[in-house]
Amino acid sequence: MPADNIFTNQSKTVMLIDDQTLYREALASLIVKHHHLNVIAQVGFNEQAFEMADNMKPDIILADPCFKHEDSIPFIYRLAQSCKESHILLISSPCSSDFYFDFIRAGVSGIVLKTETSDILLKAIDRVLSNEVWFDRTLLTSAFKEIGKRNQIADLQKNSLTCLSKREREIVNLVVNGLNTLSIAKTLHISEKTVRNHIYSVYGKLEVKDRLELALFATRNGISTEPVL
Protein backbone atom coordinates (compact mmCIF):
# COMPACT_ATOMS: atom_id res chain seq x y z
CA MET A 1 0.00 0.00 0.00
CA PRO A 2 1.47 3.38 -0.94
CA ALA A 3 2.46 5.56 1.99
CA ASP A 4 0.07 8.32 0.91
CA ASN A 5 -2.92 6.00 1.43
CA ILE A 6 -2.10 4.83 4.93
CA PHE A 7 -3.89 7.74 6.59
CA THR A 8 -7.02 8.48 4.60
CA ASN A 9 -8.93 10.86 6.85
CA GLN A 10 -6.46 13.71 7.26
CA SER A 11 -2.78 14.49 7.14
CA LYS A 12 -0.67 13.91 10.23
CA THR A 13 1.12 16.89 11.74
CA VAL A 14 4.88 16.86 12.22
CA MET A 15 7.16 19.03 14.34
CA LEU A 16 10.92 19.09 13.76
CA ILE A 17 13.44 19.82 16.52
CA ASP A 18 17.07 20.34 15.57
CA ASP A 19 19.60 23.11 16.13
CA GLN A 20 20.72 23.16 12.48
CA THR A 21 18.42 25.21 10.27
CA LEU A 22 19.65 23.74 6.99
CA TYR A 23 19.15 20.20 8.29
CA ARG A 24 15.62 21.00 9.49
CA GLU A 25 14.72 22.52 6.11
CA ALA A 26 16.14 19.54 4.21
CA LEU A 27 14.22 17.13 6.43
CA ALA A 28 11.03 19.15 6.00
CA SER A 29 11.47 19.09 2.22
CA LEU A 30 11.73 15.31 2.32
CA ILE A 31 8.69 14.87 4.54
CA VAL A 32 6.28 17.22 2.70
CA LYS A 33 6.67 15.17 -0.47
CA HIS A 34 4.38 12.69 1.27
CA HIS A 35 0.92 14.18 1.30
CA HIS A 36 -0.22 12.46 4.48
CA LEU A 37 2.47 14.34 6.44
CA ASN A 38 2.28 18.06 7.21
CA VAL A 39 5.25 19.85 8.81
CA ILE A 40 3.70 22.50 11.06
CA ALA A 41 6.73 23.65 13.06
CA GLN A 42 10.52 23.76 13.03
CA VAL A 43 12.53 24.76 16.09
CA GLY A 44 15.83 24.23 17.88
CA PHE A 45 16.56 22.54 21.22
CA ASN A 46 15.30 25.40 23.40
CA GLU A 47 12.38 26.53 25.56
CA GLN A 48 10.37 27.55 22.50
CA ALA A 49 10.17 23.89 21.52
CA PHE A 50 8.13 23.07 24.64
CA GLU A 51 5.80 26.02 24.08
CA MET A 52 5.22 25.16 20.42
CA ALA A 53 4.67 21.47 21.15
CA ASP A 54 2.17 22.30 23.90
CA ASN A 55 0.26 24.77 21.74
CA MET A 56 0.29 22.86 18.45
CA LYS A 57 0.13 19.29 19.79
CA PRO A 58 1.66 17.66 16.69
CA ASP A 59 0.93 14.02 15.98
CA ILE A 60 4.65 13.27 15.88
CA ILE A 61 7.82 15.11 16.92
CA LEU A 62 11.07 14.33 15.12
CA ALA A 63 14.07 15.33 17.22
CA ASP A 64 17.74 15.00 16.36
CA PRO A 65 20.02 15.00 19.44
CA CYS A 66 23.09 14.70 17.26
CA PHE A 67 25.84 16.86 18.74
CA LYS A 68 26.00 15.97 22.44
CA HIS A 69 23.65 13.15 23.33
CA GLU A 70 24.29 13.63 27.05
CA ASP A 71 23.13 17.26 26.84
CA SER A 72 19.90 16.16 25.14
CA ILE A 73 18.78 13.55 27.67
CA PRO A 74 17.11 15.94 30.16
CA PHE A 75 15.50 17.78 27.22
CA ILE A 76 14.05 14.56 25.78
CA TYR A 77 12.81 13.43 29.20
CA ARG A 78 11.03 16.75 29.71
CA LEU A 79 9.64 16.70 26.17
CA ALA A 80 8.21 13.22 26.64
CA GLN A 81 6.64 14.19 29.97
CA SER A 82 5.10 17.42 28.71
CA CYS A 83 3.93 16.17 25.28
CA LYS A 84 2.17 12.93 26.10
CA GLU A 85 -0.28 13.42 23.22
CA SER A 86 2.55 13.43 20.67
CA HIS A 87 4.70 10.55 19.50
CA ILE A 88 8.44 11.25 19.69
CA LEU A 89 10.78 9.74 17.10
CA LEU A 90 14.50 10.41 17.42
CA ILE A 91 16.91 10.63 14.50
CA SER A 92 20.23 9.80 16.07
CA SER A 93 23.83 9.36 15.07
CA PRO A 94 25.39 6.17 16.49
CA CYS A 95 26.21 6.61 20.18
CA SER A 96 26.88 4.72 23.39
CA SER A 97 24.28 2.14 24.44
CA ASP A 98 23.62 3.94 27.72
CA PHE A 99 22.29 6.94 25.78
CA TYR A 100 19.93 4.68 23.81
CA PHE A 101 18.71 3.27 27.11
CA ASP A 102 18.09 6.76 28.48
CA PHE A 103 16.15 7.83 25.39
CA ILE A 104 14.03 4.67 25.49
CA ARG A 105 13.41 5.10 29.20
CA ALA A 106 12.36 8.70 28.57
CA GLY A 107 9.42 7.37 26.58
CA VAL A 108 10.30 7.92 22.93
CA SER A 109 8.36 5.83 20.41
CA GLY A 110 11.34 5.05 18.24
CA ILE A 111 14.92 5.77 17.21
CA VAL A 112 16.12 5.88 13.62
CA LEU A 113 19.87 5.91 13.10
CA LYS A 114 21.35 8.35 10.60
CA THR A 115 23.05 5.42 8.89
CA GLU A 116 19.62 4.37 7.59
CA THR A 117 17.98 5.53 4.35
CA SER A 118 15.25 8.13 3.96
CA ASP A 119 12.83 5.31 3.04
CA ILE A 120 13.49 3.69 6.42
CA LEU A 121 12.87 7.01 8.17
CA LEU A 122 9.53 7.47 6.43
CA LYS A 123 8.57 3.88 7.22
CA ALA A 124 9.43 4.50 10.87
CA ILE A 125 7.31 7.67 10.92
CA ASP A 126 4.29 5.81 9.56
CA ARG A 127 4.82 2.91 11.97
CA VAL A 128 5.00 5.22 14.98
CA LEU A 129 1.94 7.15 13.79
CA SER A 130 0.14 3.81 13.76
CA ASN A 131 0.83 3.53 17.52
CA GLU A 132 3.68 1.09 17.06
CA VAL A 133 7.33 1.46 18.04
CA TRP A 134 10.47 1.53 15.92
CA PHE A 135 13.75 0.29 17.38
CA ASP A 136 16.58 -1.45 15.60
CA ARG A 137 17.17 -4.94 17.00
CA THR A 138 20.87 -4.28 17.60
CA LEU A 139 20.00 -1.04 19.36
CA LEU A 140 17.54 -2.83 21.64
CA THR A 141 20.12 -5.49 22.47
CA SER A 142 22.57 -2.79 23.51
CA ALA A 143 19.91 -1.08 25.57
CA PHE A 144 18.99 -4.31 27.39
CA LYS A 145 22.64 -4.86 28.27
CA GLU A 146 22.67 -1.38 29.73
CA ILE A 147 19.60 -2.27 31.82
CA GLY A 148 21.62 -5.10 33.36
CA LYS A 149 24.44 -2.73 34.24
CA ARG A 150 22.04 -0.19 35.71
CA ASN A 151 20.32 -2.81 37.86
CA GLN A 152 23.64 -3.71 39.45
CA ILE A 153 24.12 -0.19 40.78
CA ALA A 154 20.46 0.64 41.43
CA ASP A 155 20.67 0.02 45.17
CA LEU A 156 23.65 2.34 45.53
CA GLN A 157 21.83 5.06 43.62
CA LYS A 158 18.69 4.71 45.74
CA ASN A 159 20.79 5.10 48.88
CA SER A 160 22.25 8.31 47.46
CA LEU A 161 18.83 9.72 46.64
CA THR A 162 17.49 9.07 50.12
CA CYS A 163 20.24 11.32 51.46
CA LEU A 164 18.73 14.34 49.72
CA SER A 165 16.49 16.63 51.72
CA LYS A 166 13.15 17.83 50.35
CA ARG A 167 14.68 21.23 49.56
CA GLU A 168 17.63 19.63 47.77
CA ARG A 169 15.30 17.56 45.61
CA GLU A 170 13.34 20.71 44.75
CA ILE A 171 16.55 22.40 43.67
CA VAL A 172 17.62 19.38 41.62
CA ASN A 173 14.26 19.49 39.82
CA LEU A 174 14.76 23.18 39.03
CA VAL A 175 18.30 22.54 37.77
CA VAL A 176 17.01 19.78 35.47
CA ASN A 177 14.45 22.25 34.12
CA GLY A 178 17.25 24.62 33.17
CA LEU A 179 16.94 27.32 35.84
CA ASN A 180 20.07 29.19 36.86
CA THR A 181 21.04 30.07 40.43
CA LEU A 182 19.24 33.42 40.42
CA SER A 183 16.03 31.94 38.97
CA ILE A 184 16.07 29.12 41.51
CA ALA A 185 16.51 31.64 44.33
CA LYS A 186 13.54 33.68 43.11
CA THR A 187 11.36 30.59 42.64
CA LEU A 188 12.04 29.26 46.13
CA HIS A 189 12.27 32.70 47.80
CA ILE A 190 15.75 32.07 49.19
CA SER A 191 19.12 33.72 48.65
CA GLU A 192 21.51 32.81 45.85
CA LYS A 193 24.10 31.86 48.46
CA THR A 194 21.67 29.37 49.99
CA VAL A 195 20.98 27.90 46.56
CA ARG A 196 24.71 27.48 45.90
CA ASN A 197 25.20 25.83 49.28
CA HIS A 198 22.40 23.36 48.54
CA ILE A 199 23.82 22.61 45.09
CA TYR A 200 27.32 21.94 46.43
CA SER A 201 25.79 19.71 49.11
CA VAL A 202 23.93 17.76 46.40
CA TYR A 203 27.15 17.42 44.35
CA GLY A 204 28.85 15.84 47.33
CA LYS A 205 26.02 13.47 48.20
CA LEU A 206 25.51 12.26 44.63
CA GLU A 207 29.19 12.37 43.67
CA VAL A 208 28.65 14.52 40.59
CA LYS A 209 30.89 17.38 39.55
CA ASP A 210 28.63 19.82 37.70
CA ARG A 211 25.07 20.63 36.63
CA LEU A 212 25.22 18.43 33.54
CA GLU A 213 26.16 15.35 35.56
CA LEU A 214 23.48 16.30 38.10
CA ALA A 215 20.83 16.54 35.36
CA LEU A 216 21.87 13.17 33.92
CA PHE A 217 21.78 11.55 37.35
CA ALA A 218 18.37 13.05 38.10
CA THR A 219 16.73 11.97 34.84
CA ARG A 220 18.21 8.49 35.09
CA ASN A 221 17.02 7.98 38.64
CA GLY A 222 13.49 9.27 38.69
CA ILE A 223 13.87 12.74 40.18
CA SER A 224 10.98 14.74 38.70
CA THR A 225 11.59 16.65 35.48
CA GLU A 226 8.10 18.18 35.32
CA PRO A 227 8.13 21.83 34.20
CA VAL A 228 8.14 24.30 37.07
CA LEU A 229 5.10 26.58 37.33
Image (cartoon, rainbow, N blue to C red):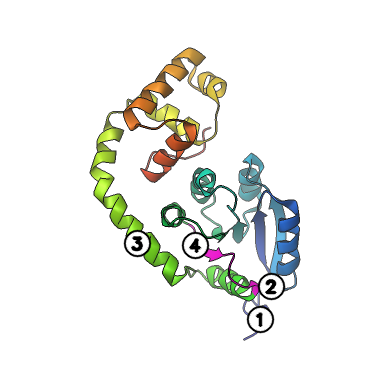
Work out whether residue 9 or residue 57 is closer to the camera in this orientation and state it: 57
Residue where numbered disc 2 is placed: 36
Q: Label 2's element?
A: loop
At x 71%, y 53%, the residue is 42
Magenta residues?
108-118
Residue where numbered disc 3 is placed: 144
From what the image shows, is residue 208 above or below residue 84? above
Looking at the image, is mark 1 or mark 3 earlier in the sequence?
A: 1
Residue 33: give x, y in percent of width and height.
75, 72
Q: Label 1's element?
A: helix
Q: Is residue 32 left or right of residue 72?
A: right
Verify CB contact (< 8 Å) between mark 3 and mark 2: no
Q: Is residue 64 left or right of residue 164?
A: right
Image quarter of the N terminus: bottom right
Work out whether residue 188 or residue 63 is closer to the camera in this orientation and state it: 63
Mark 3: give few (<14), some (14-19) or many (20+) Cα within 10 Å: some
Q: Label 4's element?
A: loop
Give residue 109's mark.
Answer: 4
Between the C-alphas of marks 3 and 2, the distance is: 34 Å
Q: Is residue 29 magenta?
A: no
Q: Nearer the viewer, mark 3 or mark 2?
A: 3
Q: Nearer the viewer, mark 1 or mark 4?
A: 4
Residue 161: give x, y in percent of width and height.
30, 34
- Amino acid found under the numbered disc labelled 1: Asn
Residue 209 seen in the figure: yes
Quarter-of-image position of residue 40? bottom right
- Amino acid found under the numbered disc labelled 4: Ser
